[in-house]
Image (tube, rainbow, N blue to C red):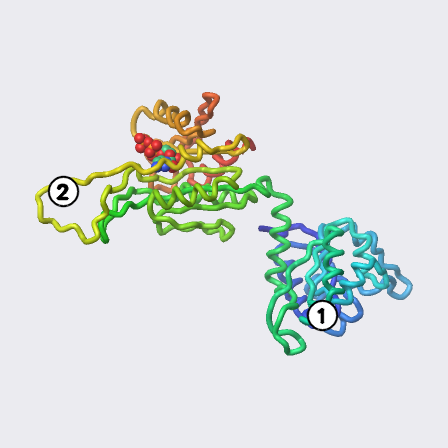
């Protein structure tokens, strides 16, 4: 998420929310954006243009001409990567919708070749007026991005809809917009599984494995960093992705993981099954703690459904499905068999014979097997770097 190097024109209009704009400019500049501010005459009554020029490090412009100098609205409109009108009063909303060009802000809006984002701010009754609704509809139809208003205390003292989105939300909105338009996996949906699964035996015990979920979490984070919308189905582990954009569904058993994946997979473009799923679960789950009365204890286990194989059986042609194979012997042979049997596009082979690879370590070393018989070695490095290499390879961005 970054606004680094982005050129932003901020149009400020006559609404009490204008008092928040120096803070907004400060946040934008902190994110690395260059900001030029245009104020309407009414905006100047609510916020100091001196404050805005100080934080933006640019002169604040208000009029089409200042004395004998003409402010080139066409050049301004072409300079920007994005124009944000925040707060946009009911009056300016109407002006922009009608194409009336009686101040610098409206002239820049009309000549802007960049996308325009509008954050309205007004009292609730004005917000609900049919004229406002029509103006919003018109502006949306012209391709402008409307930023939802908030609910809360208004200048009138009433509580309701019409508050300008908070400066932090506006920064998030613009960052998400740029991420969507510039990142290689923007618009793609990804599903990742990670971690172990636990199969309950009795109220205090389970069958599990040593997976920590590190590799799967690293893959989910890398996909999100490249712009994908990521759903991570995560088994029981104390680790969590650091990136808040990764949507986490927590599950415990293989059955729960199966249900979550079956629901999410149809919408996914990319699915990576990195979880160490339990192959078996106890046939009976004791309702009470099993006591150590006998010398031996026999457990009867039954097979869990294979998530990867199921997804492989319903996979559509444009979906990319990747499995992992954790092997201790005859690695290539077993991994190839899994690629075929589960109808995956790639199998990432994780060998437990290599030191520094496998469960719990911070590093990994894998081979990627393709359906065309190819084998690509990813040498020992941090799991984060291995994740990047895997994603680059499978998305064909080598
Ligand atoms: N997998 C799965 N559902 C299961 C078992 C495994 O989705 N019930 C997935 C894993 O997430 C991995 C791949 O299948 O992507 C291979 O897992 P692995 O444990 O290596 O192989 P298994 O198919 O379980 O076969 P085996 O245990 O006999 O090696």
Q: Is residue 219 left or right of residue 25?
A: left
Q: Which residue is disc 1 drawn over? A: 126
> Which quadrant, please, contains the C terminus?
top right
For residue 354, say whether it is visible. Answer: no
**Disc on res. 235:** none
In terms of image quarters, where does ligand 1 lie?
top left
Residue 130 position, x and y percent, is: 73, 65
Residue 205 position, x and y percent, is: 23, 49
Q: Residues within 10 Å of mark 2 (few under 14, many from 20)?
A: few
Residue 248, placed above or below residue 268: below
Front residue of 358/125: it is: 125
Q: Please give the name of the residue rendered at 79% of the width and 56% of the height, measured from the top-left corner.
A: 109
Residue 355 position, x and y percent, is: 32, 34
For residue 65, say whether it is visible. Answer: yes
Ligand 1 within 8 Å of disc 1? The answer is no
Q: Is residue 42 left or right of residue 20?
A: right
Residue 94 position, x and y percent, is: 78, 63
Q: Please give the name of the residue rendered at 42% of the width and 40% of the height, measured from the top-left corner.
A: 383
Residue 143, placed above or below residue 372: below
């Amino acid at each position: 998420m970054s606004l680094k190097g982005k050129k932003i024109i901020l149009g400020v209009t006559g609404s009490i929310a204008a008092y928040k704009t120096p803070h907004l400019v400060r946040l934008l500049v902190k994110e690395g954006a260059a900001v030029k501010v245009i104020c309407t005459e009414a905006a100047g009554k609510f916020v100091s243009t001196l404050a805005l020029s100080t934080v933006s490090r640019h002169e604040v412009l208000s009029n089409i001409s200042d004395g004998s100098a003409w402010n080139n609205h066409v050049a301004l409109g072409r300079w920007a990567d994005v124009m944000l009108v925040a707060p946009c009063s009911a009056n300016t909303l109407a002006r922009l919708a009608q194409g009336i060009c009686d101040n610098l802000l409206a002239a820049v809006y009309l000549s802007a070749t960049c996308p325009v984002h509008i954050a309205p701010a007004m009292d609730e009754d004005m917000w609900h007026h049919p004229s406002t609704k029509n103006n919003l509809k018109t502006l949306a139809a012209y391709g402008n991005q409307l930023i939802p208003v908030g609910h809360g205390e208004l200048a009138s003292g009433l509580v309701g809809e019409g508050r300008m989105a908070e400066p932090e939300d506006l920064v998030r909105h613009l960052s998400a917009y740029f991420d969507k338009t510039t990142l290689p996996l923007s618009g793609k949906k990804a599903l990742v599984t990670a971690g172990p699964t636990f199969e309950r035996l009795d109220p205090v015990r389970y069958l599990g494995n040593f997976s920590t979920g590190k590799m799967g979490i690293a893959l989910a984070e890398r996909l999100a960093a490249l712009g994908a919308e990521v759903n991570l189905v995560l088994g029981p582990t104390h680790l969590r992705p650091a990136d808040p954009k990764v949507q986490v569904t927590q599950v415990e058993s293989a059955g729960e993981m199966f249900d979550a994946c079956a629901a999410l997979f149809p919408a996914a473009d990319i699915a990576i099954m990195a979880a160490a799923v339990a192959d078996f679960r106890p046939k009976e789950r004791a309702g009470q703690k099993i006591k150590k009365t006998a010398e031996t204890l026999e457990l009867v286990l039954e097979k869990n459904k294979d998530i990867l194989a199921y997804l492989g059986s319903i996979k559509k042609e444009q979906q990319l499905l990747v499995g992992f194979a954790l092997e201790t012997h005859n690695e290539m042979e077993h991994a190839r068999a899994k690629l075929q049997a589960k109808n995956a596009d790639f199998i990432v082979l994780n060998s437990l014979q290599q030191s520094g690879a496998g469960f719990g370590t911070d590093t990994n070393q894998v081979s990627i097997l393709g359906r065309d018989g190819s084998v690509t070695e990813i040498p020992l490095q941090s799991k984060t770097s291995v994740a990047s290499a895997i994603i680059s390879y499978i998305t064909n961005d080598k």
